Amino acid sequence: MKTMTCRELGGACDEYLSAQTWDEMVKKMTNHVMAKHPDVAEKMKKMHEQDPKKWGKEMKPKWDVAAEV
Ligand SMILES: [Zn+2]
């Protein structure tokens, strides 16, 4: 299990999100921004439309170095 903050994932608050896998983290973060930060969700959606891999490319290395808890 790894824990990252919303902000580390490009979000807008310091809430902790934890997941077993990167895919699970992506889902949690997506749900979190849609529920809490509609403006960030909108930005991520636009980013995804321009380059579907951009967000993952930027955020995945942070997941890789995050400590297992
Ligand atoms: Zn947040």
Image (cartoon, rainbow, N blue to C red):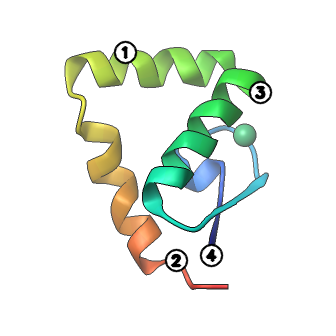
Return the disc, 4 or 1, that comes first in the chain's sequence.
4
Mark 3 Cα shell of 10 Å, populated few (<14), some (14-19), many (≥20): few
Which residue does the image show at 66% across and 16% down from the upper left? Answer: 38
Between the residue at mark 2 and the residue at mark 3, the CA separation in whole angstroms equals: 23 Å
Q: Give the alpha-carbon distance from disc 2 to disc 1, as whole Å.
A: 27 Å
Q: Nearer the viewer, residue 22 or 10?
A: 22
In this rendering, the answer to whether 49 lies above or below 9 is above
Q: Which residue is mark 2?
A: 66
**65 left or right of 19 in image:** left
Say what amino acid the circle numbered 2 marks.
Answer: Ala
Residue 10 drawn at (x, y percent): 52, 43
First in sequence, mark 4 or 3: give its number: 4
Residue at 66% from the left image edge and 22% from the top image edge: 34
> In the rendered structure, which amino acid carries the disc numbered 1?
Lys
| Residue at mark 4 to residue at mark 1: CA–CA distance | 30 Å
Q: Which mark is residue 6?
A: none
Q: Secondary structure at mark 4?
A: loop
- State the residue position of label 4: 1
Ligand 1 located in image quadrant: top right
Q: Is mark 4 within 8 Å of ligand 1?
A: no
Q: Residue at x 45, y 59 (%)?
A: 22
Circle 2 sits in a helix, a strand or a loop, which is it?
loop
In the image, which is nearer the foreground, mark 4 or mark 2? 4
Closer to us: mark 4 or mark 3?
4
Q: How many marks?
A: 4
Q: Amino acid at mark 3?
A: Lys
Q: Which residue is mark 1?
A: 46
| 65 vs 30: above or below | below
Q: Between 11 and 35, which is closer to the camera in this rendering? A: 35
Residue type at mark 4 is: Met
Mark 1: give few (<14), some (14-19) or many (20+) Cα within 10 Å.
few
